[in-house]
Amino acid sequence: MGKETLLFIILGIIIIYVIAKINSFIVLKRNVERSKSSIDVFLKKRYDLIPSLVQCVKEYCKYESSVLKDIKSLRKTFLNGNEESALKLNNEYVKLVALAENYPDLKASDNFLQLQKSLSKIESELQASRRIYIIDITKYNTKIKQVPGIIISSLMGYTEIKYPEYIIDDVKVDFSKKD
Amino acid sequence: MFNMFLIMPAIMFLFIFGIFIFIIMSVVKNNKKTQKQDETIMKYNADVITKYEKLVSSMPSIDNIRKKASRTKYIVILVFVIMLCIPIFLSLTRSINNFRYISFLIPLLFVFIIVFAIKNSSGTKKYKEFYKKTVIPAILKEFKSSLSYDMDKAMDKALYNESKLDIYDTYSSNDTITGTLCGKKFIMSDIHTQDRDTDKDGHTSYTTSFHGCYAVMDIDKKIDLTMEVLNNRGSLERIKKVDTDNSVFNKQYSVYSTDEIIALRILTPDVLDKIVLITEKSGYSFDIKIKNNKLYLRFYCDLFEPSYKDNKSDAVYAYKYITILDNIELIVKEIFKLLDELEV
């Protein structure tokens, strides 16, 4: 076997390896994007319940109008694609649910119970999708930082993905507490 | 010149002696390992062991049966060793011609091995039968009164096949436990499946595909999901692999599911921790599967074959019965709780 043949074989192996690595980065990044969009779907589903929740709460706690107003406007901003408002909206949402906890009549109402059921389901879905997102980010970040993949990833411009704040800091709403 | 008449028996003798030593060594090694595991179980589960010992104290015949079985075994082993030592002794003390004795001893040794196997198995069989007929029902009555045991009852092959957890050629089942667990219908059986391999010369050999306990429970809720938690192996179904956020769990188990979100809603961080803890504490791993509104469980441990060493090793066996049922209850309770909460 001549030197040139050997060189071609080695070069071929390197090219195949690089292509495989780049493909794996693409797949992993897609997975991250997909899991992020599934979180967004569930967040949207969660915040879609806000008008009903606000309506339901309004009837029982008339003195909390500022919270209701804030949450309504924040929801609008979020739906318009402002991701920064997500964290604020989330805090207000948690406040709203906590507010409902203080009104026993509200907690016992059929409407609220129905909403509670839907919210529990969404919370659980959201928590699962958040875990998937974090797993996917971890997998992607690990892969692009591994040797020798790090050379390809830095050449191709694959950078580390940060865990979004509003996803990490999300507060789980616990409906199981009873008065 | 070496006489073939002497060399051949000598080689055969050495060969048999070598096998004998090898068997003894592996038995000793295995025993040491089991003893260590047993000691750990006894150390951390003293209350269960005490309860068991109290339970069998009302059965005086268990000790007699065990002692009888052990005695027969030891006498046969002793005679076997003496017979093996005779030719060595003769060859060392007199002349090489005494190897002639070996040619007479070899057929005798084979007869002895057969007698030993028959004798030993009948002693063990008696003890195991007694254990299965008397001790296991007593254990269940004491610790899990909603369950009953039948040593001769087999689980229907179709019930095992529907889980699609195994591909095999031969199937056998006995030692079935039935009743209710967590208020749901429960059936568990000792299953042994084997793969058959036939080589070019037509020789058939069998290898164990699965040997352990298999349990089935109905899920009241209609749930369109196939989910598998498998002990570090691939799925037989064409479903997606799901990663979890528990690295210890990921090292021991692989999750497959038709719905990633529902799978992680069931496998909450708490459930994952519990599965890891159960595996660690019990020393055996398992498979969990949800399919067609049924919950399937497979435990990689042989529950229904007690040794007849002593009361303590029996107590460890009893502990394994109790813990396996406790663990099933724990997992099932958690999964059913989550399934109840699950709005699909």
Image (cartoon, coloured by chain):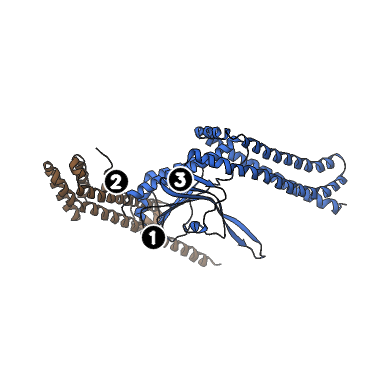
Chain colours: A brown, B blue
Tag nearer the camera, 1 or 2: 2
Residue type at the position of mark 2:
Ile
- Kindly state the secondary structure of the residue where label 2 is placed: helix
- The correct choice, above or below, for B198 with respect to B187 in the image is below
Q: Is residue B129 left or right of residue B270?
A: right
Residue type at the position of mark 3:
Ile
Residue A63 visible, this angle: yes
Tag nearer the camera, 2 or 3: 3
Q: Are marks 1 and 3 on the same chain?
A: no
Q: Which residue is mark 3?
A: B328
Q: Is residue A146 left or right of residue B142?
A: left
Q: Which residue is mark 1?
A: A22
Read off the chain for label 2.
A
The quarter holding residue A153 reads bottom left
Q: Are marks 2 and 3 on the same chain?
A: no
The answer to which of B225 and A43 lies nearer the viewer is: B225
Dot 1 or dot 2, earlier in sequence:
1
Residue at x-position 17% and y-position 52%: A51
In three-dimensional space, the C-alpha distance between marks 2 and 3, rounded to whole angstroms, equals: 34 Å
**Disc sitting over residue A168 in the figure:** 2
Question: Label 3 neighbourhood size at 10 Å, few (<14), some (14-19), many (20+)?
Answer: some
Residue at x-position 18% and y-position 51%: A52
- Kindly state the secondary structure of the residue where label 1 is placed: helix
Read off the chain for label 1.
A
- The correct choice, above or below, for B230 with respect to B93 in the image is below
